[in-house]
Image: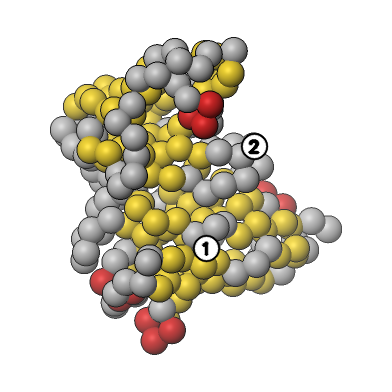
Amino acid sequence: EVQLVQSGGEVKKPGDSLKISCKGSGYSFTNYWIGWVRQMPGKGLEWMGIIYPGDSDTKYSPSFQGQVTMSADKSISTAYLQWRGLKASDTAIYYCARLALYDFWSGYFTYWGQGTRVTVSS
Amino acid sequence: EIVLTQSPGTLSLSPGDRATLSCRASQSIGSSSLAWYQQKPGQAPRLLIYGPSSRATGIPDRFSGSGSGTDFTLTIGRLEPEDFAVYYCQQYYTSPGSFGGGTKVEIK
């Protein structure tokens, strides 16, 4: 069974650093792109970017380029989303999700993590 | 970057009604690069439709998708109580991908 299990909720202060995780299981982690999706409180879904764990190739949305960093450790089947210098506007739920097709960057998300709630407040 | 516009923002219907949701792209996304998701409160989104008319595993046949180019439609044949939720379209024709703003299907 394919599963994506995300790290727990976080409460941080503006300016803090943060790294959240997404652990995949039940499939070949290195061969499927993993995406990150933001959902701000009461709002819709935003496509942030995708990473290929096999070689850590990344594609960012221009809206998130330079604001976050995606990475992956294929040895432990885990993808990460990192901030240096959180802002209140980063308060949101962040989902990881796996793209549908083997070894192909374009696609829809077939499997989703449970979401990580990040709260940034002074 | 491709912008997806969903309409209406909210659809107020009764169980048993037919629901028609629209997703319009700012430029052509071809004939197949669109997916639909359902999201219920407190839950992660769930894939419903891709390609744009193929149902994901376990999705009942009252859900159907159609369209090409810039105009796509999700139809729910007869609304069941569990279908009241928010629905999002997503294009994967280009990188970055993008989602529409969502349509909330609420009980009238």
What is the quadrant of residue A31 in the picture? bottom left
Neighbours of disc 2 within 10 Å: few (<14), some (14-19), many (20+): few
State the CA–CA distance, disc 2 to disc 1: 22 Å
Residue, disc 1:
A68
What is the quadrant of residue A60 in the picture? bottom left
Q: Residue at x 57, y 57 (%)?
A: A115
Task: Tell whether B3 sits left or right of A88.
Answer: left
Q: Residue at x 66, y 71 (%)?
A: A17
Coloring basis for residues: secondary structure
Neighbours of disc 1 within 10 Å: few (<14), some (14-19), many (20+): some
- B43, above or below A67, in the image: above
Residue, disc 2:
A42
Q: Name the residue type under label 1.
A: Val
Q: Residue at x 33, y 29 (%)?
A: B63
Q: Position of residue B38 (x, y in %)?
A: 45, 37
Q: Residue at x 55, y 58 (%)?
A: A114
Locate the C terminus of chain A and report the quarter of the image it occupies: bottom right
Q: Position of residue A85 (x, y in %)?
A: 66, 66
First along the sequence among labels 2 and 1: 2
Using the image, tell me which numbered label, if any, was put on residue A39.
none
Q: Name the residue type under label 2.
A: Gly
SS state under label 1: loop
Which one is nearer the viewer's eye here, A63 or A35?
A: A35
2 and 1 marks in contact (CB < 8 Å): no
- B50, above or below B7, in the image: below
The numbered mark 1 sits on a residue in which chain?
A
Q: Position of residue A50 (x, y in %)?
A: 37, 60
